[in-house]
Image (spheres, rainbow, N blue to C red):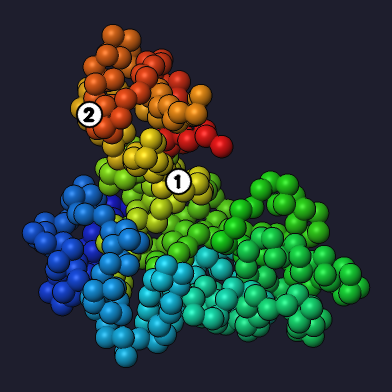
Amino acid sequence: MTDSQDEAATMAALGRCLARAMGESAGWVAHLAGVDPQSVTSRAALARLPVLRKSDLLDLQAAAPPLGGLNLTQPGDMARLFLSPGPIHEPEGRGEDWWGAAPALRAAGVRAGDIVLNTFSYHLTPGGFMFDGGARALGCAVIPAGPSAPADQVAAIRQYHPRVYVGIPDFLKILIEKLDEARVENPISLGILSGGALPPSLQDWFSGRGVTVRQSYGTADLGIVAYEDGGPGMRFGSNVIPEVVSPGTGTPLPDGDVGELLVTRVNPDYPLFRFATGDMTSLIPGDPLRMSGWKGRADQATKVKGMFVRPEQIAALARALPGLGRLRLVVTREEERDRMTLLAEHPDAGVAAQLTDLLREHTKLGGEVRIVEPGSLPNDGRFIYDERE
């Protein structure tokens, strides 16, 4: 199948899912009021849909328990029902590898007959079940260890000799060190890591211990979204449609620019359209089916002089004044007072006065404006830098 055929199939599946959601789900009817499902035939059309955020889920689920009316399968017909911090309620439907973890495990080198030590929690949150279902779909045996005591996990490792570890990076290091203390030979040679940072120093430590590690990225709402497969960055799963947008706005950014990741999951039980992950990344230029990796959190809202300043307010300045490049609001505290300084890329320093007025109009606060050379601000998706202690 060619890229154009694959794109056409993706958009066709999205159209069918969207039409069903608008026909059967009161929650989606309300959230997408006025949207014609038949008109969403391209990524540009998808970008016109409203963004769905976790705060929206909280409100929807409080008003219409348990799932906010966004589910297409009744709760009693699901396989599992979860409660994650927030609290946010998530379902798991029936069927093999419902969370989409098997491709991530397969790409990392997991094969039928492997024994997998799964240290993600099986208690109320879906992390453990995500990888459990993916591993069993590949024909693996799973040790459902969860975050149990290291001593108990060492005993299980001693007995079962798992080749594959699944969990956060730091806990894998702890287990290897505990195996050393117990003088048990480490059988783990492959680590599937998620949910925590993997700095180069720790990656080198694993390599020095003979453990190959691969990262995957997912959320409790969406399942496994992307994973390392030997190519650049991470590849997105086949059941998701990614977008990278200007934080707080929902406006798509060019490939290569860092912004907030939105994910549309085409799912017959619990679809999510333009769900804001709150995580920053960029799409790899020339291959928008890959993300560059996790670049931090998108929530940059901060309080200045008792008032919240949000990234969407700063992004709005670019729409109000043509020719602006990247913007950065730096918040400091001097002489016991909050201070705002807006750094703005523009070829004409004479726009500073106009931009000063716009800054006050959009934030209701005064601040200094400094015009800087186009291309001089970092491409990190950040609009607000709070440098106060």
Of residues 46 and 177, the one nearer the viewer is 177
Q: Residue at x 52, y 34 (%)?
A: 388
Instruction: Tell me: residue 385, above or below residue 223.
Output: above
- Tell me the amino acid under the disc marked 1: Thr
Q: Quadrant of the C terminus?
A: top right
Identify the residue at image location x=77%, y=53%: 205
252 or 356: nearer the viewer: 356
Q: Position of residue 375 (x, y in %)?
A: 42, 21
Check disc 1 and report the residue beneath it.
281
Residue behind mark 2: 361
Residue 140 location, x and y as percent?
Answer: 61, 81
- The residue at the far bottom in this view is 76
**Mark 2 or mark 1, whichever is nearer to me:** 2
Total marks shown come to 2
Residue type highlighted by circle 2: Glu
Closer to the camera in the image, 221 or 66: 66
Kindly tell me whether residue 111 is visible in this rendering: no
Quadrant containing the N terminus in the rendered view: bottom left
Measured in 3D between alpha carbons, the distance from the residue under mark 2 to the one under mark 1, in whole angstroms, is: 30 Å
